[in-house]
Image: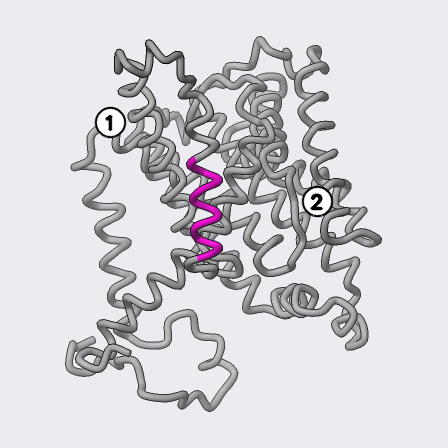
Amino acid sequence: MKLDKLSFHPCGNYRETYEQELNIFETDFGRLWMGIFLGLLFFVAPFVLSSYLLYIVNTIGIAAIAAIGLNILIGYTGQISLGHGAFFGVGAYAAAILATRLGVGFYVAIPAAGIITAMIGMIFGIPSGRLKGLYLTIATLAGQFIIEYVLIQWESLTKGTMGITLPSPEIMGWQISGDRMFFFLIFISLVCMTWFAVNIIRSKYGRAFIAIRDNDRAAEGMGIPIFKYKLLSFGISSFYAGFAGALWAYYMVSITTEPFNLGLSVEYIAMVIIGGMGNIPGAIFGATFITLLNELLRFVTGLLMNVPAIANWGLNMAPLREFVFGLAIVLFILIEPKGLAEIWRIIRSSFRLWPFSY
């Protein structure tokens, strides 16, 4: 396609068919930029980034998959969950058990872990039929603690605090190991899961989720079976968490129960709020922001612990991470409630409308 034939963003809404309304990219120019971005992501980034940067980028990719799932539940369906970290852990342990005890290949273990987690998530989503708001939040918090307890105490299955070591994934005898190889596995998965999420939201299921979020009584009055769609939303969200947890388990090689606590659930909620609720790219922005903030805080905390004055005063730097997370959430809610996705939209509009950027 020649550059002079590219369709740019129109000055108005000229859609005439449902196909045009459902297009993911409104213009050829948008498709071009997405193609350039994906080309740089897959053919440049893994070969120029150091091992440490690849580790951070891979962590962002895994977190983004889980955050997209939680955004479908919170941002699009309006159901609060404090158990996403536990579902992430269920996916990790499901993949580990399938790989070590049943000898299942990773290409089966990862989606199977997502399906197992989805079923468990739907069980804990049953209270959403009668509860909402604060009461549903407390119910999902109870689910977080129940799953944590089971993972720690069911030692015959999970090996408790000893953890499980996974075998290296293989494709036709080709072993996937190292940050660079996992980069391709993680980001191919992220692209597929993002495409799947975008299409869910554009379907009748996504429209039902949004209707329930906006007014569940009105949605029920229009004939939408709200309990069915709430359960479906919990299942999809948990599938994403389990899928991401399984990827994380293979990437980390060895897993224990410690990471899958309430703090991890709060991190994912922070990703959704800071990135932008009800926005798929916002979940990716939020995962990027929180992961980089984690690395920055780890570096800053290490520096502060070596400052003699702080050591002499006996100040504890451990709660610094929680303090900064809470501060970031409050600031985004006050300053930009729609999150990083809205900031990105404003920046894009500024370039598109230049020199009339208003």
Does the magenta run of residues contain 328? Answer: yes
Give the Cα distance between marks 2 and 1.
39 Å
Q: How far across and how far down the image is residue 138, in percent? A: 73, 40
Residue type highlighted by circle 2: Thr
Look at the picture and state if 334 lies above or below 22: above
- Residue in the picture at 74% in, 72% down: 219
User: Which quarter shows the N terminus?
Assistant: bottom left
Disc 2 crowd, CA 10 A, few/some/many (<14, 14-19, 20+): some
For the record, the magenta segment spans 324-334
- Residue in the picture at 57% in, 21% down: 103
Q: What is the number of the mark on residue 51? A: 1
Residue type highlighted by circle 1: Ser
Q: Nearer the viewer, residue 38 or 127?
A: 127
- Residue in the picture at 55% in, 14% down: 164
Closer to the chain start, of discs 2 and 1, is 1
The quarter holding residue 204 reads bottom right
- Residue in the picture at 42% in, 48% down: 286
Left or right: where does residue 51 sit relative to residue 341?
A: left
Look at the picture and state if 280 lies above or below 185: below
Disc 1 crowd, CA 10 A, few/some/many (<14, 14-19, 20+): some
